[in-house]
Amino acid sequence: MSILGLLTFANFNSAMAQDAAATEATEQVTATDEAAAIEEAPIEEATEAAAAMDDTKSFHQVLKEKYIQGGAGWMTPVLLCLIFGMALVIERILYLNMATTNVKKLLDGIEDNVKGGNYEGAKELCRNTRGPVASIFYQGLDRVNQGLENVEKAVTSYGGVQMARLENNLTWIGLFIALAPSFGFLGTVVGMVQAFDDIEVAGDISPTVVAGGMKVALLTTIFGLIVAIILQIFYNYILTKIESLVDQMEDGSISFMDILVKYHK
């Protein structure tokens, strides 16, 4: 029984030692896996953060990348067309807005002065009112002593002068509208020639070479068309504004002559 007890106790201790060794090995593997996971976590987080940054690029960053891909040599002329064209557009819009006049109020003031024979007061009112309509009325009042026929000629002639001033710089805006897509198409053609040169050097029609070259070539056309569309929209707005002012000038001139015919002696 003593021998049997010793053998049983020895076997028990051996089993306990094996279990402890197995437990320790398992813990070491687990610790190793956790350390590897901890080391891989920052890498995965950095990769996910980079992907998130790529997905959330600002419009300015995307535009800058496309500008560089299109080539500064061809994208710069298109950009200059946009800058100079928008400068002229802003100048015209400001000028036309300042040229807008309350014609009815001006005519009422002129009629009140002319009715009492105060032509100097009517001229002073025109001088203090901005816009082409007031300038036309002033030219007519300045020649009222020369007869209504001369007044009508002065109003008609000076109306043509004011109309030409309203249309100033429209030719340049139209030029930039035409130049922007032209530069874009030229850059596209040159880019396609370069793409074919790359294919010739490679000796094989690789989809990567063809796609990359065509993408860069077409970017200039895209930007040129966008610039032309933007300028064309503002150009049509300016034309509409000019037409409105011309209608005011014509209707106001007719009413102005009616006032002079009615009260001039």
Image (cartoon, rainbow, N blue to C red):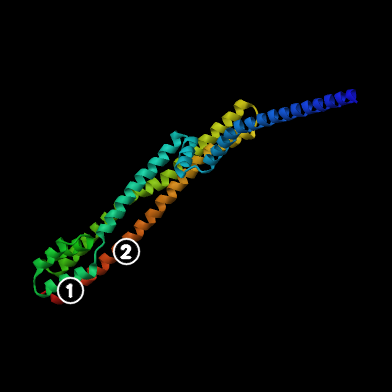
Foreground residue among 192 and 46: 46
Q: Residues within 10 Å of mark 2 (few under 14, many from 20)?
A: few
Secondary structure under tag 2 reads helix
**Residue sitting at x 36%, y 43%:** 83
Foreground residue among 204 and 260: 204
**Residue sitting at x 51%, y 43%:** 56
What is the quadrant of residue 36 in the picture? top right
Q: What residue type is labelled 1?
A: Ile
Q: Position of residue 54 (x, y in %)?
A: 53, 40
Quadrant for the N terminus in the image: top right
Q: What residue type is labelled 2?
A: Ser
What is the quadrant of residue 183 in the picture? top left
Foreground residue among 123 and 101: 101
Secondary structure under tag 1 reads helix
Q: Where is residue 81 in the image (x, y as percent from the top left)?
A: 39, 43
Whether residue 105 sits left or right of residue 41 in the image: it is left
- The residue lying furthest to the front in this view is 2
Q: Residues within 10 Å of mark 1 (few under 14, many from 20)?
A: some
Quadrant for the C terminus in the image: bottom left
N-terminal label among 1 and 2: 2
**Residue sitting at x 64%, y 32%:** 34
**Residue sitting at x 16%, y 74%:** 261
Q: Mark 1 points at which residue?
A: 259
- The residue lying furthest to the bottom in this view is 262
Image vertical order of residue 239 relative to residue 185, above or below: below
Whether residue 147 sits left or right of residue 101 in the image: it is left
Q: Name the residue under label 2.
A: 244
Which mark is on residue 165? none
